[in-house]
Amino acid sequence: MIQKNIALNKIKYQKMKISDDLIDSIFKRGIAIAIKVKQIDEDYYECIDGHKRLNALAILSLEDAKFNQVPCVLQNDFSKAGSAYWGNTKNKH
């Protein structure tokens, strides 16, 4: 898996109401567990796990730009992997 910071406005996520406790926790401690995303095209990503945390970051980013960069983990995409990806080796386990 690849870890990288992604701009909040490049991530598509489900909008929802969240608790003030979550917002306060992220404000004080930051994001402890990276948001899991998958790349949907060259510039945009879709949230797989972390919708509530992204909603909290959206609120916090209105007051502080440091919350615009989101620590993310990219889901592996094997759709472009051909047989060479798997090595065509004798090892078949």
Image: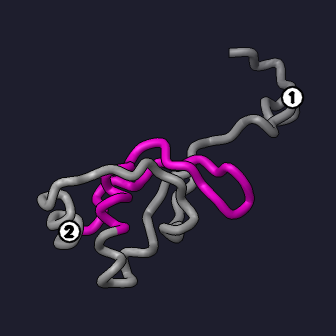
Residue 38 forms part of the magenta stretch: yes
Where residue 23 sits, quadrant-wise, is: bottom left
Query: Which residue sits furthest left?
Result: 21
Q: Is residue 75 magenta?
A: no
Tell me which corner region of the image, top left, top right, bottom left or bottom right, holds residue 58. Answer: bottom left
User: From the viewer's perspective, is 40 left or right of 51?
Assistant: right
Q: Is residue 88 above or below residue 62?
A: above
Answer left or right for 32 relative to 51: left
Question: Furthest-top residue in view?
Answer: 92
For residue 1, say whether it is visible. no
Three-letter amino acid code at the position of disc 2: Arg
- Asked whether 58 or 37 is in front, the reply is 58
Give the magenta range.
29-58
Q: Which mark is residue 83?
A: 1
Instruction: Name the residue at 47% across, 48% down.
Output: 36
Q: Position of residue 90 (x, y in %)?
A: 82, 18
Q: Would you say 56 lies left or right of 6 here?
A: left
